Image (cartoon, rainbow, N blue to C red):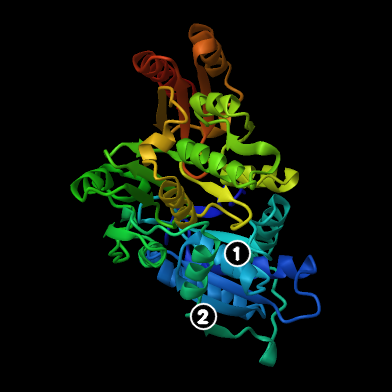
Amino acid sequence: MARLFGTDGVRGVANADLTAELALGLSVAAAHVLAEAGTFEDHRPKAVVGRDPRASGEFLEAAVVAGLASAGVDVLRVGVLPTPAVAYLTGALGADLGVMLSASHNAMPDNGIKFFARGGHKLADELEDRIETVYEEHRTGAPWDRPTGAGVGRVTDYDEGFDKYVAHLIGVLPNRLDGLKVVLDEAHGAAARVSPEAFARAGAEIVTIGAEPDGLNINDNCGSTHLDLIKAAVVEHKADLGIAHDGDADRCLAVDAAGNEVDGDQILAVLALAMREAGQLRNDTVVGTVMSNLGFKLAMEREGIALVQTAVGDRYVLESMKEHGYALGGEQSGHVIILDHATTGDGTLTGLMLAARVAATGRSLAELADVMERLPQVLVNVKDVDKSRVDTSAELAAAVTDAERELGTTGRVLLRPSGTEPLVRVMVEASDIEHARSVAGRLADVVKSALG
């Protein structure tokens, strides 16, 4: 059986790949695996379950809740909240397990299941593997050991989760946002209520777009993957900046007052300097990924800040941060982890911290982001290829070697399979955008021919 868990939980087309039966079975398996590991020892187990507003989240939530309760786990159902809110509440409420139903930035027909361990941290790979194994054993006929009577789990709607999470966000801000005008694009997603409430309570004047989820319009030409709307809105409303989230609000990108994009690398650079100034950037180090722009690396070197690079995926950034005690890390895509205040990427928290830096310094976002120069970077997604052969194709390896020789020291090449979608990403950096496009186009053609 192919591994169900990718870099960010289990994802697929809802009711086709990700069915109610799969959601229920994985939830029961997760409860049994955590029980085996001693997580529930000497107490009645408790889980927090949340979702984004996708229509399919309604039946998948019901399946997950039923699975957990049937395995003897009490469930706090928090409803539509961002992924980082579910992670936070898992820790804050002393739950043994958290479950988030979301496919993040993916289109509406997709959905996903993400499990959090006690404390709100992502499950270790070995636990995910064990859940898959146990799920498959029971899917093919082995009976579950089921509690009865008072042993079954109880289900409670926990409506206080919204206010508890917003209060947490406001409580960790270094300063208020009074005097700032901010446009928020909520991607018709999980932060449609949370983010405007948090920015307003922090003192900002807000304009919201993409904040009317109907279950079908999540990520639909809005949010952090479609910035045209927020760029226009920031200019139209003469705002100081804009913040765009994805469907589950674990990431954010920004827009300056002139409507220019400020990506995750630039956000990291701004926050790294702010945290170092406040004495919060432990070891004067920030964690990025191999996709971090070369300009970000050069800027950090110039500022005397070390950059540790990991594989792509916020779980790998987080692993490095936890192992070495670093306080800040993230990805170009806008996943930013501020470990003192969150156990996962938190788009609302990141946006608040970025706005707080603008307010505290009196400098524009454009001026702050100028700490780094983004070198031209071209990313091509090559679909419908066998992504599992990226590292074994001799034809592809030869093409990459030729491209690297051509670029020399002024650029770089990175090929990697997507962890959540059936495609291969071709990334090329060069000092000239046309050169980068040319090399990326040629490599994309080789990927198609070699892996198609």
Location of residue 16 with respect to 159 vertically, above or below: above
**Quadrant of the snapshot with the C terminus:** top left
Q: Residue at x 60, y 85 (%)?
A: 154
Residue 204: quadrant of the picture: bottom left
Residue 27, quarter of picture: bottom right
Q: Is residue 28 left or right of residue 54?
A: right
Kindly give the residue lying farthest to the bottom in the view shown.
149
Residue 326 in the image: state x and y as whole percent: 68, 44
| Residue type marked 1 | Leu
> Would you say 104 lies left or right of 95 here?
left
Q: Nearer the viewer, residue 311 or 269?
A: 269
Q: Which mark is residue 158?
A: 2
> Whole-Å distance between the Cαs marked 1 and 2?
23 Å
Pick the front one: 125 or 314: 314
Residue drawn at the location 66% of the way across and 57% of the way down: 123
Q: Secondary structure at mark 1?
A: helix
The residue carrying pointer 2 sits among few (fewer than 14), some (14 to 19) or many (20 or more) residues within 10 Å by Cα, namely some
Q: Earlier in the sequence, mark 1 or mark 2?
A: 1
Q: Quadrant of residue 388?
A: top right
Residue drawn where x is 71% and y is 56% of the image: 127
Q: Is residue 22 visible?
A: no
Locate residue 422, reporting x and y percent: 46, 40
- Tag count: 2
Residue 31 place in picture, x, y as percent: 68, 70
Residue position marked by numbered label 1 in the rendering? 26
Residue reaching furthest left? 236
